[in-house]
């Protein structure tokens, strides 16, 4: 009982998915124990973590695997206890089962990893501005279009999907800073929110009123010159310029860091995790205009593409060459 009490002092409990995603972005190494209250081996492994001196250099969190289903599904937790190691948002190691020797070895190994080099912080308002301008129609949702987590988001997704207008989305539950900051930035207290060309349209009720009046599609897709016209091309270039400058290090990948959809994207994500590089990303498969337009904009024909402070560094191969030469961190973060 005494050991469990001390373990609780060291371990922090995660109860929401937003807390989870925020916690694993730590520049140091984060250990997350996916557990279940009814599982005795989980309690025993908590004691193992507490007894390992090197665990003091890690941030240690605990998740009830059966309650935080979104995180468990994302990382394919099929049994407890399972231990995941993260750095700068990337998964770097995994230990499954009540294997004390393997867990201690992993803790000792990762306690020696240097902290990730933190990219210069982007001011929140600048980041929010880039987000609302990152797509012609941008919806800030609770959850995702495929898995909405509130009734109004579910209704909005159904409404947007009923139009012929493509849109991009951001899950505000995945980022506490955006969740709170966007309310102030937009002067709109609730979610979902819809922006068109960087300007707030409103929430679900406003969009439904527009649909009832037969004005929703016109609002989402203001009249523009034909695709290929100089004004349309200029608009796309402005959007791409905003995207590549959205963060100090920006990676355009196929898929997401947790579910890359091509081999080169998977290699790049692993490289950044191994090197401790903090970055933001954009899934090019979610936006056809970006997918095709960025190739011309950067004069680079393939993905992934990596930008540092708005300048193209290259793809997966170039990043690996820089890492092998010991120059990746300096190329991306300017020696920070």
Image (cartoon, rainbow, N blue to C red):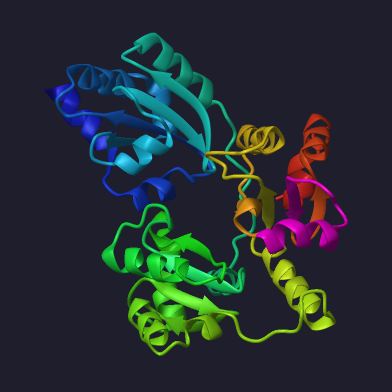
From which residue to which does the magenta span run? 288-308
The question of residue 305 being in magenta is answered with yes
Whether residue 111 is visible here, answered yes or no, is no
* Relative image position of residue 163 (x, y in whole percent): 49, 72
- Work out whether residue 206 or residue 162 is closer to the camera in this orientation and state it: 162
Q: Residue at x 35, y 11 (%)?
A: 99
Q: Quadrant of the N terminus?
A: top left
* Relative image position of residue 29 (x, y in whole percent): 49, 35
Q: Quadrant of residue 95?
A: top left
Residue at far left of view: 1
The question of residue 87 being in magenta is answered with no
Q: Is residue 106 above or below residue 219?
A: above
Q: Residue at x 46, y 66 (%)?
A: 161
* Relative image position of residue 38 (x, y in whole percent): 14, 25
Q: Residue at x 23, y 40 (%)?
A: 67
Q: Is residue 88 above or below residue 98?
A: below
Residue at far bottom of view: 213
Q: Is residue 321 left or right of residue 255?
A: right
Q: Residue at x 71, y 56 (%)?
A: 291
* Relative image position of residue 129 (x, y in whole percent): 58, 75
């Amino acid at each position: 009982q005494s050991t469990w009490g001390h373990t609780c002092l060291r371990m922090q409990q995660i109860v929401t998915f937003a807390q989870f995603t925020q916690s694993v972005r730590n520049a140091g190494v984060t250990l997350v124990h996916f557990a279940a209250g009814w599982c005795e081996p989980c309690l025993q492994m908590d004691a193992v973590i507490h007894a390992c001196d090197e665990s003091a250099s890690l941030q240690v969190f605990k998740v009830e695997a059966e309650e935080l289903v979104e995180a468990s599904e994302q990382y394919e937790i099929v049994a407890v206890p399972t231990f995941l190691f993260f750095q700068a948002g990337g998964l770097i190691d995994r230990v499954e089962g009540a294997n004390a020797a393997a867990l201690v070895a992993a803790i000792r190994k990762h306690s020696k990893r240097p902290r990730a080099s933190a990219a210069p912080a982007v001011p929140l308002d600048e980041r929010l501005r880039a987000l609302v301008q990152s797509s012609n129609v941008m919806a800030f949702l609770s959850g995702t279009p495929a898995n909405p987590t509130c009734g109004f988001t579910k209704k909005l997704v159904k409404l947007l999907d009923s139009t012929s207008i493509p849109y991009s989305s951001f899950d505000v539950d995945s980022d506490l800073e955006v969740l709170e900051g966007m309310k102030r930035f937009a002067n709109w207290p609730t979610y979902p929110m819809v922006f068109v060309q960087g300007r707030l349209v409103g929430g679900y009720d406003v969009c439904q009123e527009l649909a009832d009046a037969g004005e929703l599609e016109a609002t989402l897709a203001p009249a523009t010159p034909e695709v290929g016209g100089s004004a349309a091309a200029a608009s796309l270039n402005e959007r791409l310029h905003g995207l590549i400058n959205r963060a100090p290090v920006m990676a355009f990948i196929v898929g997401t860091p947790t579910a890359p959809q091509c081999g080169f994207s998977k290699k790049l994500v692993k490289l950044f995790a191994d090197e401790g590089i903090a970055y933001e990303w954009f899934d090019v498969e979610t936006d056809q205009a970006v997918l095709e337009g960025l190739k011309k904009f950067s004069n680079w024909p393939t993905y992934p593409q990596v930008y540092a402070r708005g300048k193209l560094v290259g793809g997966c191969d170039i990043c690996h060459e820089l890492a092998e030469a010991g120059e990746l961190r300096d190329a991306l973060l300017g020696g920070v």
